[in-house]
Amino acid sequence: MLANQIIKDYTTFKIGGAVRYLSVCKSIEDLLEALTWCNGQGLPWFILGNGSNILVSDDGFPGLVIKLGGRFKKVKFDENTVEVGAGVFLPVLSQRFLEMQWGGFEFMCDIPGTIGGALRLNAGTKQGEIKDHFISAMILTTGGEVKSICKEEMGFAYRHSSFSETRDIALSALFSLPFLEDRESILEKRKRIILGRRQKQPRNRRNCGSVFKSFPGQKPAGWYIDRAGLKGTRMGDAMVAYEHANWIVNLGNAKAEHVKSLIEKIQNEVFRKFDITLERELIFVPEDIL
């Protein structure tokens, strides 16, 4: 367990102060021990995946940040299913599917998150979502019970799952393997996806991904932000990206407060112009955790 770690080094936004403790848990036993210790110390905790889709306060986090390693990064293929640890990085998993020539998972190839985070938000793109081939997940409940839950219990919706409403922790997920496909065909799909995303996304990689949710029946969130004339708008070193208005980039020394102020300005301007309230996809830490 490490003390006083600067969390920005563990996030894609490269923003955030020091966390009181950081621990890498390599097994369920490690995880249970860490959570029991937190409860005994009266400290808050949260699980950190790849550090995308979150904004950590400039004051850091007053408890324990847990990263999943060891057995949580294992991938086990069976005849028609694959079991994936919650700490597995989605592009790495997509590469494994390419090597095994299993089609249907190309959408994962450029999503900068882990399976655990993807389950929480039902991560995906226009090409697919994490729920599409999901069968079940092993979870650790807030009561300390390890159990399996099925797809119906996950409550999957757009950028939402049951994990969004509980402190249950995803340990692993089981997916069906829908169809075998020629390696070159899968590779070509991956190339098209990556090229399409690169053409639309900011070249500045210090970002969190999409900031606001886009809902069916509405224009994409970026459309409203663009039409409100907000591309290039800055608060400190936080700026609405020119390439895609639903992305905020860190120009170098952005603070969490800069990003929050910019988000508030975007919401106010879009509401004033379109009478639409944009809902954050970005998670604030610690506000959305505690």
Image: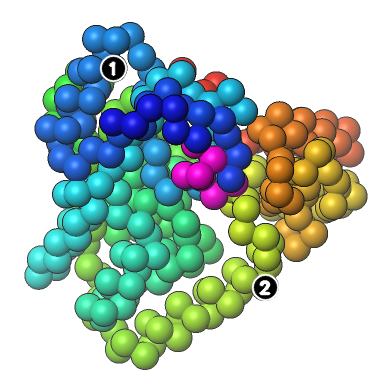
Instruction: Check if residue 10 falls in the magenta segment.
Output: yes
Residue 42, quarter of picture: top left
The amino acid type found where label 2 is placed reads: Gln
Q: Residues within 10 Å of mark 2 (few under 14, many from 20)?
A: few
Asked if residue 49 lies left or right of residue 202, the reply is left
Residue ID at (42%, 23%):
20
> Residue 282 — which label?
none
Residue ID at (31%, 64%):
93
Tell me if residue 140 comes above or below residue 37 in the rendering. Answer: below
Q: Which residues are magenta?
A: 7-13
> Residue 199 — which label?
2
Q: Give the residue at the far left of this rendering.
A: 79
Residue 97, quarter of picture: bottom left
Quadrant of the rendering where the N terminus is positioned: top left
Frontmost of labels 2 and 1 is 1
Decide which of tag 2 and tag 1 comes sooner along the chain: 1
Q: Percent position (x, y) of residue 130?
A: 37, 54
Residue ID at (23%, 38%):
25
Q: Percent position (x, y) of residue 251?
A: 74, 51
Question: Which secondary structure lies at badge 1?
Answer: helix
Q: Residues within 10 Å of mark 1 (few under 14, many from 20)?
A: some
Q: Which residue is mark 1?
A: 38
Residue 35, quarter of picture: top left
Residue ID at (67%, 73%):
199
Residue 281 appears anywhere in the view: no
Asked if residue 7 lies left or right of residue 202, the reply is left
Asked if residue 277 lies left or right of residue 13, the reply is right
Colour convention of the picture: rainbow
Q: Percent position (x, y) of residue 163?
A: 36, 33
Q: Give the residue at the far front of this rendering.
A: 3
How many numbered dots are placed on residues in this image?
Answer: 2
Pick whichever, 131 or 212, lies toward us.
212
